[in-house]
Amino acid sequence: MVELKATTSLPTKWGYVSLSIFKTTNYDELMVASNNVLGKKTNLRMHSACVTSEIFGSLKCDCAQQLNSALKMIAEVGGIVVYLPQEGRGIGLTNKIKAYNLQESGFDTVEANQKLGLAQDVRIYDDVAEVLSFMGIEQVNLITNNPLKIRALSNLGIQVIERIPTIQSPNEFNYNYLKTKAIKMGHIDLG
């Protein structure tokens, strides 16, 4: 089901990466940045889109920081970043903005999703496993703080050898968000 549609060398502020676009089961255009991927094992970041932080500079989360640190790592030591269009833990941009509005009234991220009748995280990672298989990758060092990502990849037949924490400095706007991820979602090493 995977088709490599386009690839190019992309200069970044950390060095060159190869930027590829794949067609997968769920996405017509799935972006994958990679560098120095040799053999069947590599570093991997599965990163879900966050328009509010990555484009508009929101300080309510640490998503842009996590993406930038993962891109820096793969440019320096090698690996893959799969950029997934799963905004707001998979609930979509409109629902994410509705949840933000509820958070302004005192709800945390999990409670806001529940108030909207949504699950706290509905992301899927099948397409990541498809791309990794296409690239011949069987084992990864996963760049994450989210134990659900480790289980999801393992269930899809990708062996997670090591978890690499992505530790970012909290700020006054995302402190409670990070605390909620740790307490209610089981995230670890949040800084």
Image (cartoon, grey):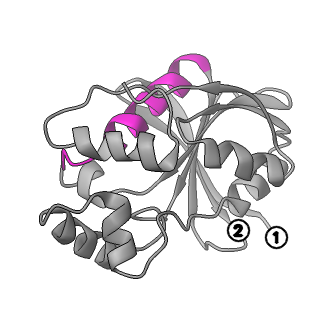
Q: Mark 1 points at which residue?
A: 1
Looking at the picture, which amino acid does disc 2 mark?
A: Thr
Task: Give the percent coordinates (x, y) of residue 95.
Answer: 33, 77
Mark 1 → mark 2, Cα distance in angstroms: 6 Å
Going by the picture, which residue comes out furthest to the bottom?
Answer: 117
Of residues 96 and 52, the one drawn nearer to the viewer in this rendering: 96
Q: What stretch is highlighted in magenta?
A: 58-77
Q: Which residue is drawn at 52% across and 42% down?
A: 186
Residue 66 falls within the magenta-colored stretch? yes
Residue 56 numbered tag: none
Q: Quick one: label 2, few (<14), some, or many (20+) residues within 10 Å?
A: some
Q: Look at label 1 and name its amino acid.
A: Met
Relative horizontal placement of residue 62, taking residue 59 as reference (left or right): right
Q: Earlier in the sequence, mark 1 or mark 2?
A: 1
Question: Looking at the rendering, in which quadrant would you find the N terminus?
Answer: bottom right
Q: Does residue 178 appear in this view?
A: yes
| Figure quadrant of residue 175 | top left
Q: Out of 85 and 95, give the one closest to the viewer.
A: 95
Question: On the image, numbered disc 2 is attached to which residue?
Answer: 24
